[in-house]
Amino acid sequence: MAPKVIHGAIVHSISLGEVEIIENGTLIVDADGVIIALNKSSDEALSIPDDAELYHLSPGEFLIPGFVDTHNHAPQWPMRGLGQGLHILEWLDQVTFPVEARFADADYARRTYETTVCDFLRQGITTASYYGSRHAEATRILAEICLEKGQRAFVGKCNMDRNAPEYICEQSAEVSLRETRDCVAHIRRLPGCSDPKHALVKPVLTPRFAICCTSELLSGLGNMMKTDVDLAMQTHFNEAQEEIDATRQLFPDLAARSEADLYESFNLLNQRSILAHCTIMADYDKERLKALECGVAHCPIANMTVGGGFMVAPVRDFLRREIKVGLGTDSGGGWASQILSVIRQTMIASNAQEVISQGADKGLTLEEVFYLATLGGAQVMCLDDQIGNFQVGKQFDALWITTTTGLQSAMTPREEGDSVRTIYEKYIMSGDDRNILHVYVRGRRVAGSGQ
Ligand code: GUN
Ligand code: FE
């Protein structure tokens, strides 16, 4: 790959609440996809590599970092939107498990995952943390497809050895653990994936949730997490009251105070843990997440539609306590494959939380939510030293956004004299995938509506 020099408007997060808008910037990306310079004005001197390809963004175009989806069920992509109004455990039984069971068929998995990964890339999701189904072969296929298509991903074989219908439940904890170890090893053997820190596709432990896992299984996974310091873990955490109650019944002692105690007792909570939902959170739950440095995958579409009814996660309080937070499509618990939809729902949910908390938890600003969708998500996945913004030394995972009229995108039209700030705001709040001309991961173009 030739190095790239890209001139134009650049928008990225520096910190929570601080979005930097560079009207006339220059980015230099080396042959490995690493950002080696970010010049903020055309006056600064640049040393441009001889063989570099030059790109100029037109007026009305700008670059943003790629979106990070911290919670995504790849096998649920074909069922997004189904089962609205069902409660979480009914929804799993009636809608989700029958769909996930289809992934026992490797041909079906390959066909479906090809389209799934392409769709998420087209929506600008350059990094995703995927739950696979419980099938090892389908999960290996998912990891291979992410690598082929160039998406940065965590991929996990879902563990579930109880409280699921026979046609999808795993035979035993032993089989589940063996297949998980094989899957982890397989992903690390994929081309370029042997360095556990810098691989594009990495394995992640994925106990579905405690209701579907025996103590033996959780304990085995916890041992893997403890001994393998590069392994991340993801699960569903305090998603809905019905789920919390069922967890307490299954683990009356361990979960008596909090699901945090339960997962911690199995060595599953540390800075590499990604906990989805976290809607019903007592002070104690929040204190444990902060102390254990776990990250939250906030999935407001799922929380306010399927699964829980109308659940609102206390994101402002998480941020106040400096708990890491990213956004998740939860596709298909959420109906969207677009992070833009999740961003908008995050704004709505945070306004609801302001009302619920009687003003104590102020609604989130656009700057803050954009941060969650990019740098915040990178922190949750412990990838913020590699991606999340355009800091020199990070990898170039980026979206080239166009707002040219005539695209037939849903975006509020750009008008004469609009500032970069205005077109950025219009895109985030009303644009869609047609505005994403090019999607880059590690400097390589992997998708986009343009040529
Ligand atoms: N809890 C256990 N499994 C699931 C799932 O697939 N989706 C959601 N939203 N919650 C879960
Ligand atoms: Fe989920």
Image: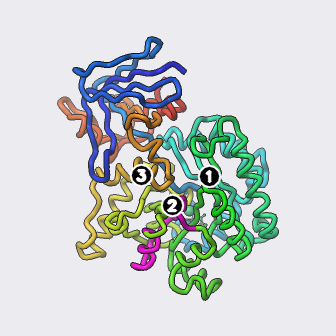
Distance of label 2 from label 1 (alpha carbons): 24 Å
Residue at the extreme top of the image, as rendered: 50
Q: Which residue is mark 2?
A: 271
Residue at position x 33%, y 25% from top? 26
For this view, does 394 lie left or right of residue 333? left
Instruction: Give the structural element (helix, strand or loop) at label 1.
Output: helix
On the image, the x and y values in percent for residue 265 come to 60, 76
Give the alpha-carbon distance from disc 3 to disc 2, as whole Å. Answer: 27 Å
The crowd level at tag 3 (other Cα within 10 Å; few <14, some 14-19, many 20+) is many
Residue 227: give its label: none
Residue pointed to by mark 3: 341
Instruction: Please name the amino acid that badge 2 sits on.
Output: Gln
Crowd tier of the residue under label 1, counting other residues whose Cα lies within 10 Å: few below 14, some 14–19, many 20 or above: many
Residue at image coords 81%, 64%: 175
Q: Residue 390 in the image: state x and y as whole percent.
A: 38, 37
Frontmost residue, 437 versus 185: 185
| Left or right, residue 48 beside residue 126 | left
Position above or below: 251 against 180 = below
Residue picked out by circle 1: 74
Q: Assign a secondary structure to mark 2.
A: loop
Residue 14 showing in the rendered view: yes
Respond yes or no on whether mark 3 lies under 8 Å from ligand 2: no
Closer to viewer: mark 3 or mark 2: 2
Question: Which numbered disc, 2 or 1, marks the residue that appears first in the sequence?
Answer: 1
The residue nearer to you, when weighing 412 against 142, is 142
Q: Quadrant of the N terminus?
A: top right
- Decide if residue 310 is in sight here: no
Task: Write down the region rendered in magenta.
Answer: 269-290
For the point 40% across and 25% down, which residue is it? 28
**Residue 395, how many percent across, how many down?**
47, 35
206 to 436, vertically: above or below: below
